[in-house]
Amino acid sequence: MRLIHPLAGNVQEYLAFEDALLAGAEEVLSFWESKEPAVVLGRSCSPFEWVHVEACTAAGVPILRRNSGGGAVVLAPGCLIYSMVFSIGRRPAWRNVRRSFEEILRRIASAIGAEYQSPSDLAIQGRKISGCAQRRTSFAILHHGTLLYDFDPALAERYLREPPRQPSYRSRRSHRDFLANLALSPREIMTRMAGAWNVGEPFTASAPEPHRIYGSPTDMCSKSAGMPAHPHKTPECETSSAARTQYRPHWRAADGRSLP
């Protein structure tokens, strides 16, 4: 497994970058973080069920849609995102979705000192510090998630509604009472994660322009009927195989060497 450092970009570019990693089907681990708040929906989420759309629009917070399942999340400083691609050919047991979630998350939990909460959370003393989701092709799994280390839970309360589907351990707690932060620095988190997955030499990779994955910005549209016409439309997540193959990450070693 390679550790990939994406070059700086915005959330929309990072989401496209993750799609490109999945299309490449190489086993990689990557980390990124949003410099500004952004709301990201799962591919089937209705923004009006999960998001305070008016609050986001008033604050200029973009509402985007990722290509994986799960609910809505606020990305902001203090929320580290990890992205992992696994080969199904190398890990055939992970064709079982539930098994893949549990085995991946238990390894991460052991590395960072957290507890696994089925089916897709990590917690510390009963408070959530990580959620995750997957997107699959015939050949690979994109498994990505959040790791909170200095995140302000007030942002979640401001921009997200109480989720319509909640794990039992949440016990109907508010975002503010439910979320917590790891007592680790970003560097410590990344070092522990890299060690857990035995990653090799780190590489950087250039992120694609979003339209290389999703189509032109003017073609971006909500999958949910009635999405208001504001500047932060959720991108349509269905993309053709031809569109996906337009971009492959350009790997570059830490010393600047280009790699195939």
Image (spheres, rainbow, N blue to C red):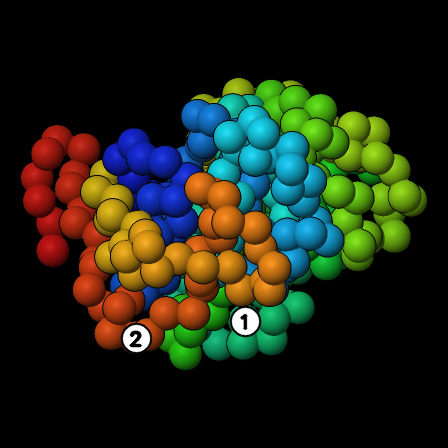
Q: In the visual, does 25 lie left or right of 76?
A: left
Residue type of the residue flagged with mark 1: Trp
Residue type of the residue flagged with mark 2: Ser
Residue 36 % position (x, y) = 47, 26
Q: Is residue 57 visible?
A: yes
Residue 62 % position (x, y) = 49, 38
- N-term-proximal mark, 2 vs 1: 1
Residue 260 % position (x, y) = 11, 55
SS for callout 2: helix
Q: Which residue is mark 2?
A: 241
Tag in front: 2 or 1: 2
Q: In the visual, does 144 lie left or right of 52?
A: left
144 relative to 26, above or below: above
Q: Are dots 2 and 1 in contact, CB under 8 Å?
A: no
Q: Which mark is residue 52?
A: none
| Residue drawn at (69%, 40%) of the image | 52
Q: Residues within 10 Å of mark 2 (few under 14, many from 20)?
A: few
| Residue drawn at (45%, 59%) of the image | 221
> Could you give the CA–CA distance between mark 2 and mark 1, rounded to whole angstroms?
23 Å
| Residue drawn at (64%, 52%) of the image | 47
Closer-to-camera residue (56/122)? 56
Q: Residues within 10 Å of mark 1 (few under 14, many from 20)?
A: many
| Quarter location, residue 126 | top right
Q: Is residue 199 visible?
A: no
Q: Which residue is mark 1?
A: 94
16 relative to 62, above or below: below
| Residue drawn at (69%, 52%) of the image | 48
